[in-house]
Image: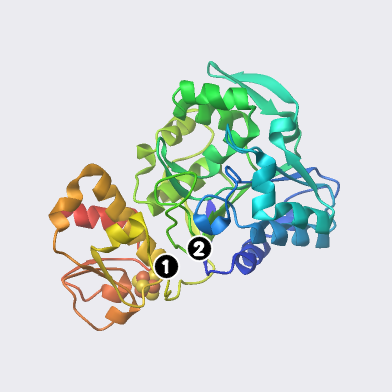
Amino acid sequence: MDIRIIYSDDAASMTEKLISSYGLEGKIGRKDSRIILKPNFVVPSPADNGATTHIEIITTLIGYLQEHGFENITVAEGAWVGASTSDAFSKTGIYDICRKYGVRILDLKKDSYRKVSYDGIPMEISETILNADYLINLPVLKGHCQTQMTCCMKNLKGCLSDRSKRAFHQMGLSKPIAALNAIVKPDLNIVDSICGDLDFEEGGNPVRTDRMYLGENAVLTDAFGASLMGFRPEDIEYIPIAASYGIGSMNIEDINLIELNKPSASSAKPHGAVARLASYTAPDMACSACYASLIHALKRMDDNGSIRKLKGMKIACGQGYRGKSPDIGTGICCKDARISVKGCPPSAADILRTLEEL
Ligand code: SF4
């Protein structure tokens, strides 16, 4: 199954290239199809804080869809329990965009719900979401304090009533998330992996990654996202449960990865919790995606305590190492290092495996 990936810091241009290369207009069907765009506006916070979807992605999608004659478009989201969706809409600027393009915007906390159940998990899901003809999921790839990672599958939790959101937490999140995805299956997932948070769904420690990717199946697209963050798909509990429901494959070997371009060097400086992990690195003209893979691998080692063995080490990363021989480095630019990790960019999972073996 195809996953298309692109690297840049320009959300609008990446979105345009991804959906054009995918041929989105030919996939939707009737011009009067009810198209729902489901971003992640879990909290009222700007996208560069690492929690929410960049609105340039939504703006580009709306413009593209309208250009191709699709007019029945709704932007729909429900913030987490305790936060106001309308505050999130205001803070992100999406109200103004929807007004400008004449697009409906819906707070899913105010929608009517249908009671459904799957594998013993009862839930109340938005009628608008269930009645969509074409659902485009627009999650952010980021860390999560309970499920470790959140992306396509977990983003659909915003389609539930607040009562069901609370119940999902009481039931331990993973099985309910998989059950929800057995009922709501996005037609397309366009992942904002531009600066998702290191470990919290509400943001605060964004990791500059400068990439987006697109996949049709939420389970496989999440399995891919897990590998980008240094996890094995089976580490994210809801992925194997969903795979066992037959919703999708979790085998990243099944992915046909289509790279629309290659990353380029970034000058972004890490801060907060990311800066602490960055003390184990020595970047020199590193591309964001490459450096983020290294940071995520270090985060996994920080979580399991094995980072101690890296004390005093500086892991090389970046185009400035071409033709040089550092002791240890990541990516093809460091291929002459004594210990190197293949890839351009390498995945966090591959970097982690190498560091763990040291
Ligand atoms: S290997 Fe080099 S060129 Fe490739 S992503 Fe990493 S730093 Fe960039």
Between the C-alphas of marks 2 and 1, the distance is 8 Å
Classify mark 1: residues with Cα within 10 Å, few (<14), some (14-19) or many (20+): many
Q: Residue 215: where, in percent of width, then height?
A: 56, 51
Mark 2 vs 1: CB contact within 8 A: yes
Residue 288 is labelled as 1
Residue plotted at (13% across, 54% down): 309
Q: Is residue 354 visible?
A: yes
| Label 2 crowd (10 A; few <14 / some 14-19 / many >=20) | many
Judging by the rendered image, the residue that carries numbered circle 2 is: 211
Q: Residue furthest bottom?
A: 323
Amino acid carrying label 2: it is: Arg
Task: Answer above or below: position of 150 versus 176.
Answer: below
Q: Which mark is residue 162?
A: none
x and y, in percent, of residue 188 in the image: 63, 48
Which residue extends farthest top? 120
Q: Is residue 358 among what the camera can see? A: no
Residue at image point 45% right, 75% down: 264
Q: Nearer the viewer, residue 38 or 202?
A: 202
Look at the numbered disc 1 and give the secondary structure of its residue.
helix
Q: Quick one: label 2 or label 1, which is nearer the N terminus?
A: 2
Q: Is residue 219 above or below residue 27?
A: above
Three-letter amino acid code at the position of disc 1: Ser
